[in-house]
Amino acid sequence: MSVPAIGVIGGSGLYELEGLTDVRWRRVRTPFGDPSDEYCTGTFEGRPLIFLPRHGRGHRLTPGELNFRANIWGLKSLGAEWVISISAVGSMKETIHPLDLVIPSQFYDATRRRISTFFGEGIVAHVGMADPVCPVLADALEKAGRASGAAVHRGGTYICIEGPQFSTKAESRIYRGWGVDVIGMTNMPEAKLAREAELCYATLALVTDYDVWHEGHDAVTVEAVIQTLLRNVATAKDVLRRIIPAVGPPRTCPCPDLLRNAVITQPAAFPLATRRRLDLLIGKYFPLPTRKPRKAPRG
C-alpha cells in the first residue's frame, strides 16, 4: 500500500526544496478542467510530496483565474491526504508584523465570482465549515514554525477578497472593523473544496505588509510585497523541512470522513454521469452500480 502524500500549494520557488529527490512534473486531467500547472512530485525523507505552483510557473494566473476545483482534485487524485496552503497576506492587526507567520483557524469569503463546490448537477452535499482547518495539521505547522525561529500567530481570521487589485483604504478599514487578522486573495474557495475532498487543510500565511490601513507605513505595492515575500520563502522552506517528517498516517482528525453524512441526495436519484464524475470523492460511500452481463443471443 502506497504512503499517502503531503500536498503543498504555494509560490513557484517552493518546489526547489533542498533534499527533494525523484522529482518529476506530472500533468493531471480533471473533470473540472486544467489545474494551474503540472504538479511537481518528489520524495523528502521518505515522504511523498506534491507541489502545485498556485499561479502557474512564472506567475501567469490572477487569483480570479485560478481553477480551484481542478487544483484540489488533482492533489486528491495523486494521493495527497494533507494540504499545506502557503499564502502571502497583508496584516490587519498592529501586533502582526511583516515577516511573521500566521496559521489562521477561520476564513471569511468575500469573493464574488468563484465556483466553490464540486457538487451540483443532480447531487447535493452540505459539508460543515464551522472549523475549516484541520487541527492536527495546524498544530504541526505551529510547532514547525516556532522551531524555525519565526514569530508565529496561531488562530485568527483570514479574509479572502476577489482581487487582483489591493484594497482601498475604506475597504481595509471596514475589514479591520470586522476583526479579521490577515487579508489575502487565494484561500477561498480553496479551503471549502479541500473540505469536500476530505483533505486535511491548513494555511501557512506569510505576512508581507500592513495592507493600506496603517498610517505609519506606506501603502502596499507589488515591489514591497515581492521583496518581503522572497525573505518569507526561505522561512517557508524551513517550516516545510520540519513539518514533512512530522505529518503521517493514521489521520485521527475528522477530515477523512467529512462526506459521510454530507450528501443528502438519495442515491437512487443520482444522475449516472454526475455520479461517475464524482467517484474520486464519494465512491467509498456510494459504489458505482455494477453492470449486468449481457445474455448471449439464442440460436
Image: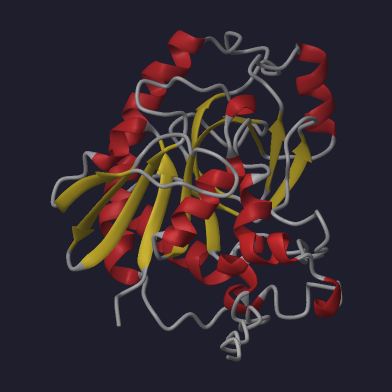
Q: Is residue 134 left or right of residue 139?
A: right
Q: Position of residue 182 (x, y in %)?
A: 64, 36
Q: Position of residue 173 (x, y in %)?
A: 80, 22
Tell me, yes or no, if residue 7 can be seen here. Answer: yes
Could you tell me which quadrant the N terminus lies in?
Answer: bottom left
| Image vertical order of residue 123 relative to residue 40, above or below | below
Residue 279, quarter of picture: bottom right
Q: Is residue 173 left or right of residue 67?
A: right
Q: Is residue 129 left or right of residue 29?
A: right
Task: Name the residue rendered at 53%, 54% in the picture.
Answer: 73
Residue 70, quarter of picture: top right
Colour style of the rendered protein structure:
secondary structure
Q: Position of residue 198 (x, y in %)?
A: 59, 68
Task: Name the residue rendered at 47%, 18% in the picture.
Answer: 225
Task: Name the residue rendered at 57%, 8% in the picture.
Answer: 218
Residue 63, quarter of picture: top right
| Image vertical order of residue 261 relative to residue 86, above or below | below
Could you tell me which quadrant the C terminus lies in?
Answer: bottom right
